[in-house]
Image (cartoon, coloured by chain):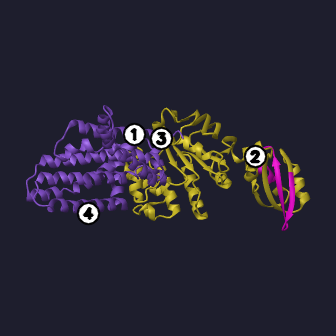
Amino acid sequence: MIVANELVKDYGELRAVDEVSFEIRQGECVGLLGLNGAGKTTLLRILSCLLTPTSGSVSVYGADVIRESEAVRGKIGFLPEEPPLYGEMTVGKYLEFAARLRGVPRTDVGGRVQDAARRCRVTEVIDQRIETLSYGYKKRVGIAQAVVHRPPLLILDEPIAGLDPAQIVDMRDLVRGFRGEHTVVLSSHILTEISQTCDRILVMQKGRVVASGSEEELSVGQGKGRRVSVRVRGKKEQVEDALKGVEGVKSWELSETNGTIRALITSEKDRRAEISRVLVRAGLDLIEIARPEGELESVFLKLTGDGRKEP
Amino acid sequence: MRSVWLIARRELVATLRSPLGFIVTALVLAIVGLLFNLRALGGGEKYSADVLAQFFYDLSGFVIVASILVSMRLIAEERQNGTIVLLLTSPVRDHQIVLGKFLGALGFMALLILITIYMPLLVMVHGKISWGHVFAGYLGNLLLASGALAVGTFGSSLARSQIVAVFVSAFLVAAMVMMWLMGRVADAPLDDIFANLALHNIHFSPFRAGKVHLRDIAYYLSVTGFFLFAATRMLEARRWR
């Protein structure tokens, strides 16, 4: 469990992290979301003991990052935005070095390296020099070094930065695979990435955590309620009549495109099951039911709206 | 201690494989070899001990320059490439990182110095030398390398750029070598203090003559310890920035 209390980090006059407090539970996958300069990287660097906070405290599995820094470092695996790789080493030798540096006993090193290489899908390049690898492979080797000693906490700073779309999908699968086994904290300014990978989002703006929760909770917190987008084939009146009968549905907007009706429905609680049931019962062809596109984007922009107006 | 050896071994292998390692080794061996040929064979008959003393003296100059060049990358390159993150986020103490890096570089310098052993052996074939003299000369050069490398490690901890690091280290080492000049112009008791702080003159001369004094060993070990301590503090200070 990670507990941060009124964490502050100043760089001279600039306050990069401003009285941040949060808790992250064992096995959770938490995403730090924020615009560039919001303080995400500084926060991750404090968690990984690369930086000492100006004030406040953070404990990682009971160990304080300032007073028991060495103990904390034994519990974490960290991937910075640029993977820390020695180009002249082969992937295998590098992972072996990283494992031994993190205290893995010599007898276990071989197995751990093979395991990390397999999980991060770098087995085929294990004897290749790192400097000859593509950027996507380098990122994966970077993740492999972070997990090779099986740390309980995995900290990933912008894990998909610089990757092409195929590599992003690969990386997403990889990170998802760590959920449960490791507590994962990752940062990104790419909304879809965070929403698809993480259980919970901490939205940062100007060094502060301005909101925390799942995508849905954030939407509710912003007065949007729980929104669901439905596409059906039928008549508008039929849709309206059907929706009137669903308890908890507050409002809806209907639009017609290409012979189908799109309904953007706002409800107090998650009513997707009931909505789909009444629409089908009303004789409508239910084509699609999903969260509205751009939902997180609009929540995010609302939360960080002030930040965007800054020069 | 395991972490120290781990870092030292990686550092040694990286230096041996780097173009800098090849170039430094090749240049030192070529120039010291030429100088040895010139000193040993030119200018009539000489005592073997004198040839040997001159060889150790010549070697010492290149040991200082090579140490500065080898040490410039120790921490600055890691920071430049971002690989320092791997070390700083591992359960390893800052002094272990500095010590490991230093020992790796010292290992390289020890190999470089020992490769020149064929020159004293050539003197032995054609003359008469004492093994004690050879041991003292090499010990002196190794201690000198240790001091210069420690200064270089400190210089490397100050800057992100290796170029800046090499200039800072060269300036510090030059200032420490020049202390003997300050000792000549300063009044008592400063003259003695400056002369005894000099990196090369007073403390290296006995080694080249085949003498080993505890005070000279203590001096080089103190310089090494002081600058490695300073480099460690610099590394620690970076966590606060």
Which chain does tag 4 point to? B
Q: Residues within 10 Å of mark 1 (few under 14, many from 20)?
A: some
* Distance between mark 4 and mark 3 Cα atoms: 46 Å
Magenta range: A252-277
The residue type indicated by label 2 comes to Asp
Q: From the viewer's perspective, is residue B27 above or below residue A33?
A: below
Q: For residue A6: magenta? A: no
Q: Colour of chain B?
A: purple
Mark 4 vs mark 3: tell me if same chain.
Answer: no
Q: Which quadrant is the C terminus of chain B positioned in?
A: top right
* Distance between mark 1 and mark 2 Cα atoms: 44 Å
Using the image as rendered, state which of residue A132 and residue A147 is in the foreground: A132
The residue indicated by pointer 4 is B30
Q: Secondary structure at mark 3?
A: helix
Residue depth check, mark 4 versus mark 3: number of the one nearer the observer = 4
* Distance between mark 2 and mark 3 Cα atoms: 36 Å
- Residue A199 location in percent, x, y? 64, 46
Residue at 25% from the left image edge and 41% from the top image edge: B203
Give the label on residue A73, or none.
Answer: 3
Q: Are marks 2 and 3 in contact (CB under 8 Å)?
A: no
The residue indicated by pointer 1 is B95
Mark sitting earlier along the chain (4/1):
4
The residue type indicated by label 1 comes to His
Mark 4 vs mark 1: tell me if same chain.
Answer: yes
* Distance between mark 1 and mark 3 Cα atoms: 16 Å
Which chain does tag 2 point to? A
Residue at 83% from the left image edge and 44% from the top image edge: A248
Q: Residues within 10 Å of mark 2 (few under 14, many from 20)?
A: few
Q: Secondary structure at mark 1?
A: helix
Which chain does tag 1 point to? B
The residue indicated by pointer 2 is A306
